Amino acid sequence: QVQLVESGGGLVQAGGSLRLSCAVSGSISSLNVMGWYRQAPGKQREFVAHITSGDSTNYSHSVKGRFTISRDNAKNTVYLQMNSLKPEDTAVYYCNANIGTKSTIWYWGQGTPVTVSS
């Protein structure tokens, strides 16, 4: 059984920074792409960033240049460093991970809330 546990969310003023973490535990044969999504109140969940096992990254246009995704494979953990936060970044942030070799499965965490005050 695989678990993803996010941490690091909270309340921050506009212009501030937060660092989210997502630790993956359980039966992990191969930890492939890891990513972050977010869901603001009343909106659909949207892509934020992802990172491959080879450390290639991709970001949504709205966060590019402000957020940085990274991973520590020894700790099975993915991070999201969020700088220059804006009120529109307020959302519940979810991590996900693609795990497996020949047959892969996407797993999701429970989410961590981020609130940016103006």
Image (cartoon, grey):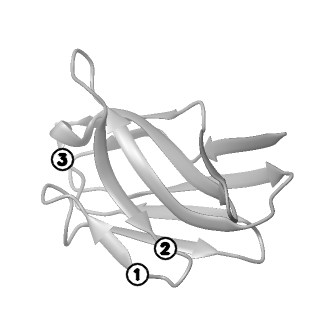
Give, as a three-letter code, the residue at label 2.
Thr
Instruction: Give the Cα separation between the discs numbered 1 and 2.
Output: 5 Å
The relative height of residue 81 versus residue 25 in the rendered view (above or below) is below
* Mark seen at residue 56: 1
Q: Quadrant of residue 77?
A: bottom right
- Where, quadrant-wise, is the C terminus in this rendering? top left
- Which type of secondary structure does the marked residue at label 3 adopt? loop
* Mark seen at residue 86: 3
Please give the name of the residue rendered at 14% of the width and 55% of the height, measured from the top-left corner.
Answer: 62
Q: Residues within 10 Å of mark 1 (few under 14, many from 20)?
A: few
Please give the name of the residue rendered at 30% of the width and 56% of the height, measured from the top-left corner.
Answer: 16
Instruction: Give the Cα separation between the discs numbered 1 and 3.
Output: 26 Å
* Mark seen at residue 52: 2
Nearer to me, 118 or 26: 26
Give, as a three-letter code, the residue at label 1.
Ser
Nearer to me, 13 or 72: 72
Q: Residues within 10 Å of mark 2 (few under 14, many from 20)?
A: some
**Residue 46, image x, y percentages:** 27, 39
Nearer to me, 34 or 15: 34
Of callouts 2 and 3, which one flags the residue occurring earlier in the amino acid sequence?
Answer: 2
In this rendering, the label closer to the viewer, 1 or 3? 1
- Which type of secondary structure does the marked residue at label 1 adopt? loop
Please give the name of the residue rendered at 36% of the width and 75% of the height, measured from the top-left corner.
Answer: 57
**Residue 1, image x, y percentages:** 84, 39
- Which type of secondary structure does the marked residue at label 2 adopt? loop
Residue furthest to the bottom in view is 54
Of callouts 1 and 3, which one flags the residue occurring earlier in the amino acid sequence?
Answer: 1
Nearer to me, 11 or 101: 101
Give, as a three-letter code, the residue at label 3.
Lys
